[in-house]
């Protein structure tokens, strides 16, 4: 099997495994098993492990951001959660960079589409806008990697795009008496407002692309 076809096969298998894990392992079930550690001295190690494993189970980043708020409060929890949001996005980002850019098929079209989008919108703005719209975190990270976004632009775009979601989640977590995943909810009006900002951020490049067609 040629290297490009092997890479495509690996990418398809990886996506299938993540999708299966997301269905079988929920953040609520996982955190229920380790709830006793949430107030223990070992919590920092637990938090690092959860951020490292999160992409494999496609858990929402907001759940761990709320956990930071619950454990550390708003002032300390917010910077920790923002660092975690960027760090946990790097694994799917680097996985996306390994997707072959040549050839056809579904992966080839997705890679070409990602490249075209980030060339139009720019790395920082493109990633930030995609994060503001409530789309799966792994899809955004993988697309940025496949689209050739530099790691610094990806990190900055992720930081900006995740900022409002992280603030909302950390505030929610800081107000909980007992951490329960089902209590981590964001006001639908806030979701609509943040998503609208994300759409507005790429209206200019999208209109320019439409004019050129």
Image: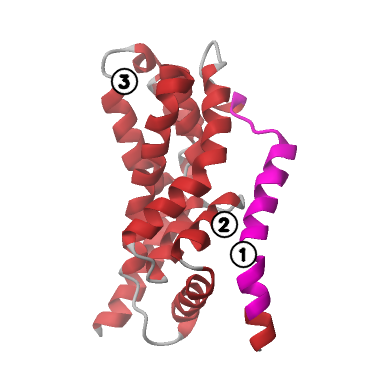
Q: Do the residues labelled 3 and 2 touch (CB within 8 Å)?
A: no
Of residues 200 and 171, which is closer to you in this image? Answer: 200
Q: Are marks 1 and 2 in contact (CB under 8 Å)?
A: yes
1 or 2: tag closer to the N-terminus: 2
Q: Quadrant of the N terminus?
A: bottom left
Q: In which quarter of the image is the C terminus?
A: bottom right
User: Overall secondary structure of the magenta stretch?
Assistant: helix
In space, the residues marked 3 and 2 are separated at their CA atoms by 32 Å
Determine whether 175 is above or below 182 in the image: above
The kind of secondary structure element at disc 3 is: helix
Q: Which mark is residue 202?
A: 1
**Res. 32 visible in picture:** no
Name the residue at 48% across, 68% down: 122
The kind of secondary structure element at disc 2 is: helix
Q: Name the residue under label 2.
A: 129
3 or 1: tag closer to the N-terminus: 3
**Res. 49 visible in picture:** yes
The kind of secondary structure element at disc 1 is: loop
In space, the residues marked 3 and 1 are separated at their CA atoms by 39 Å
Q: Residue 43 carries which label?
A: 3
Q: In which quarter of the image is residue 96?
A: bottom left
Determine whether 120 is above or below 16 in the image: below
Residue 110: horizontal and vertical position, in percent? 49, 75
Q: What stretch is highlighted in magenta?
A: 183-208
What's the colour scheme? secondary structure
Of residues 162 and 153, which is closer to you in this image? Answer: 153
3 or 2: tag closer to the N-terminus: 3
Asked whether 193 falls inside the magenta stretch, the response is yes
């Amino acid at each position: 099997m040629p290297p490009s076809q092997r890479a495509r096969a690996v990418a398809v298998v990886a996506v299938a495994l993540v999708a299966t894990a997301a269905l079988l392992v929920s953040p609520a079930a996982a955190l229920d098993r380790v709830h006793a550690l949430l107030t223990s001295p070992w919590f920092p190690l637990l938090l690092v492990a959860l951020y490292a494993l999160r992409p494999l189970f496609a858990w929402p980043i907001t759940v761990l951001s709320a956990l930071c708020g619950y454990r550390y409060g708003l002032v300390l929890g917010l910077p920790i959660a923002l660092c975690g949001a960027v760090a946990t996005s790097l694994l799917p980002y680097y996985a996306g960079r390994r997707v072959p850019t040549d050839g056809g098929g579904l992966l080839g079209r997705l890679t070409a589409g990602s490249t075209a989008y980030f060339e139009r919108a720019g790395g920082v703005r493109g990633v930030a806008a995609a994060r503001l719209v409530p789309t799966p975190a792994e899809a955004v990270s993988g697309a940025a990697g496949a689209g050739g976004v530099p790691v610094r632009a990806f990190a900055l775009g992720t930081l900006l795009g995740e900022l409002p979601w992280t603030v909302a989640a950390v505030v929610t977590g800081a107000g909980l008496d007992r951490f329960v995943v089902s209590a981590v909810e964001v006001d639908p009006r806030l979701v609509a407002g943040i998503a609208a900002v994300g759409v507005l951020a790429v209206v200019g490049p999208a209109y320019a692309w439409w004019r050129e067609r």
